[in-house]
Image: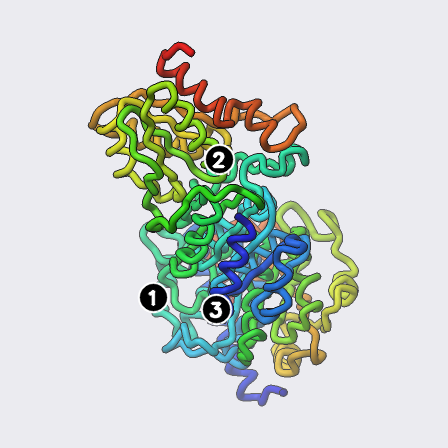
């Protein structure tokens, strides 16, 4: 499927909105992980507007597609897309991280409609997603299970256990998306533990793999509307992204894994978003 | 006990498609009938317990009742964070089944001794801890755990344990079974050590000591009333478990007694010292080494009571 010009404009506007929320939330909360939240905004926007069969008015709809944010630290933009698509009031976003809030600093399912499972410790989400996909196959259900991983998370041995398992069981209802923003906690992925060739690794384990620019709305839409990439195999979408995408001084900077936008930086970030398309 | 468990689960699963048996590539010969007859309800996760446990949570959150199955520490401590975050946090219907509780795999060495499992599982929020004392209790526990909502740990022995219950006892999770009444002291047992405890009660009877024996098949939630009642009725309480002295049944009972405003009976925990065994041997050999065979238990009780042999 390709996007019409109108659709593209709509998705761009939503991406901008989600980025604005992300800056506001991490500013107000003095929270980390703004860079990790910004790198996956286009992926979330396409998923929630064009791909996932979900119903905000019935979050527990049994036949819904499942989405698991395994990189739970990137939750600011995740909460924002859920609010913007109607799973809960946008006002909740103002409470992010704060005392008595529902919105914790890692994706949390308790009292937050639309969140399948709580995450935060890396290397958990893909196993749970694989279990859900296996249950769907056993029950002849048609729902699909999407799991967003970080690149740093691919250091976890437990990430590679379901990567080994899912192709053996032909789980073509399972989709792994790697937000490959190339920066992890203490350095670039290349410096810490080089994942290259990441696509070749997933392929060698039996996954059908595609690589795209993870900020290209058309490329994301095109890939995720042609699932499974190959019948009988789980699909892996490696999305090449930019950490801190959309705020020029945050892009590709390790610092913004941790730093919260304050003062002039906060104002500059919002101004840059305002001027963007 | 493992045979009793698997037979019972197989019978229930035939009529309940929600039940999934997920193994970590273990159970040769034991799980074969289940695997062959109910392939849609069987999963071999391979030698990958973290993924096994995470997948079990995912299946449980999709409507299944998943029994993960492996031996000793493999399904328990190896994937501990998956148990905590994926299973317990989401209150998922996963039952973690470990075969070889205590030193059942004695001669295989400490890597195969499950001697801290009860302590670790007790500490997990939402998790209940069940350790049947004989094959009859194992069957009853299996049936009860199908009905139960939420995460559970089922600690089994191996195969060939003696049947202690000559009749089917009333069984309720969280409710101790009184195996025999006694007026002098109380022996509280959990898990596969039960036959030794019953044997110890016989030896003590021969010394004129009338011991109540409780099978505390559920360590969490603990049957607090049964403990407090024994504190009222008898003047000494001994806990017996094939588990580290730290954090298991003995600790659970101690917590209740320490906070109780009722009578203060003599209290002693019998278990395995909190260290790795440097001795090699069978379960029976190791039990006798730690004073946890019938004779050793009786001797420890007599010593604590100050009764000369």
| Color style of the picture | rainbow
- In the picture, measured across the screen, residue A136 lies left or right of residue B199, that is right
Horizontal and vertical percent for residue B99? Answer: 57, 46
What residue is disc 1 on?
A91
- In the picture, measured across the screen, residue B120 lies left or right of residue B177, that is right
- Is residue B296 shown above or below B37? above
Q: Chain of mark 2?
A: B
- Residue B212: which quarter of the image? top left
What residue is disc 2 on?
B193
- In the picture, measured across the screen, residue B58 lies left or right of residue B305, that is right
Q: Chain of mark 1?
A: A
Q: Residues within 10 Å of mark 3 (few under 14, many from 20)?
A: some
Whether residue A270 can be seen here: no
- In the picture, measured across the screen, residue B223 lies left or right of residue A65, that is left
- Is residue A146 shown above or below B92? below
Horizontal and vertical percent for residue A195? Answer: 74, 56
How far is disc 3 from disc 1 in space, using C-alphas? 39 Å
Quarter of the image for the C terminus of chain A: give it. Answer: bottom right
Horizontal and vertical percent for residue B23? Answer: 61, 56
Q: Residue at horizontal 53%, vertical 64%?
A: B20
Answer whether labels 3 and 2 touch (C-beta < 8 Å).
Answer: no
What residue is disc 3 on?
B18
Whether residue B194 can be seen here: yes
């Amino acid at each position: 499927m390709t996007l019409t010009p109108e659709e593209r404009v709509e998705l761009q506007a939503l991406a901008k909105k989600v980025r604005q929320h992300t800056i506001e939330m991490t500013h107000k909360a003095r929270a980390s992980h703004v860079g990790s939240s910004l790198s996956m905004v286009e992926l979330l926007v396409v998923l929630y507007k064009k791909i996932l069969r979900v119903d905000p008015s019935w979050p527990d709809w049994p036949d819904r597609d499942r989405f698991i944010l395994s990189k739970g630290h990137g939750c600011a933009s995740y909460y924002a897309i859920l609010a913007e698509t109607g799973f809960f009031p946008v006002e909740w976003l103002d409470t992010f991280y704060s005392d008595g809030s529902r919105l914790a600093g890692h994706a949390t399912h308790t009292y937050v409609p639309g969140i399948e499972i709580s995450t935060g410790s890396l290397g958990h989400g893909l196993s749970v997603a694989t279990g859900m996909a296996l249950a769907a196959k056993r029950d002849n259900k048609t729902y699909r299970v999407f799991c967003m991983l970080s690149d740093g998370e691919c250091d976890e041995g437990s990430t590679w256990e379901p990567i080994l398992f899912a192709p053996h069981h032909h789980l073509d209802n399972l989709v792994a998306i790697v937000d490959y923003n190339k920066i992890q906690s203490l350095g670039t992925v290349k410096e810490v533990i080089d994942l290259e060739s990441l696509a070749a690794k997933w392929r060698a384990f039996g996954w059908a793999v595609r690589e795209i620019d993870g900020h290209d709305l058309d490329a994301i839409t095109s890939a995720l509307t042609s699932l499974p990439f190959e019948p009988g195999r789980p699909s892996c979408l490696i999305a090449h992204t930019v950490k801190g995408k959309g705020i020029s001084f945050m892009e590709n900077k390790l610092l913004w894994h941790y730093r919260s936008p304050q003062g002039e930086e906060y104002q500059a970030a919002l101004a840059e978003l305002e001027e963007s398309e | 006990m493992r045979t009793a468990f698997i037979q019972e689960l197989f019978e229930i699963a035939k009529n309940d498609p929600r039940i999934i048996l997920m193994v970590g590539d273990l159970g040769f010969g034991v799980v074969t009938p289940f695997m062959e007859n109910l392939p849609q309800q069987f999963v071999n996760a391979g030698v990958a317990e973290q993924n096994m446990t995470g997948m079990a949570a995912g299946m449980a959150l999709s409507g299944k009742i998943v029994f993960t199955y492996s031996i000793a520490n493999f399904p328990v401590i190896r994937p501990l964070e998956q148990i905590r975050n994926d299973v317990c946090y989401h209150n998922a219907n996963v039952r973690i089944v470990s075969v070889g509780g205590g030193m059942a795999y004695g001669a295989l060495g400490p890597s195969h001794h499950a001697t801290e499992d009860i302590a670790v599982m007790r500490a997990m929020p939402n998790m209940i801890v069940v350790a049947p004392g004989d094959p009859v209790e194992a069957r009853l526990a299996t049936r009860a755990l199908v009905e139960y909502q939420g995460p559970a740990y089922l600690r089994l022995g191996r195969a060939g344990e003696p049947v202690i219950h000559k009749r089917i006892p009333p069984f309720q999770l969280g409710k101790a079974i009184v195996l025999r009444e006694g007026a002098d002291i109380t022996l509280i047992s959990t898990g596969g050590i039960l036959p030794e405890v019953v044997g110890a009660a016989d030896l003590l009877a021969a010394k004129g000591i009338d011991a109540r024996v409780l099978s505390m098949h559920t360590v969490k939630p603990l049957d607090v009333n049964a403990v407090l009642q024994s504190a009222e009725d008898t003047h000494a309480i001994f806990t017996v478990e094939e588990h580290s002295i730290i954090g298991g049944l003995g600790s659970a009972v101690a917590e209740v007694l320490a906070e109780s405003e009722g009578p203060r009976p003599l209290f002693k925990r019998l278990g395995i010292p909190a260290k790795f065994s440097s001795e090699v041997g069978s379960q029976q050999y190791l039990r006798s080494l730690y004073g946890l065979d019938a004779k050793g238990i009786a001797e420890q009780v007599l010593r604590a009571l100050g009764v000369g042999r």
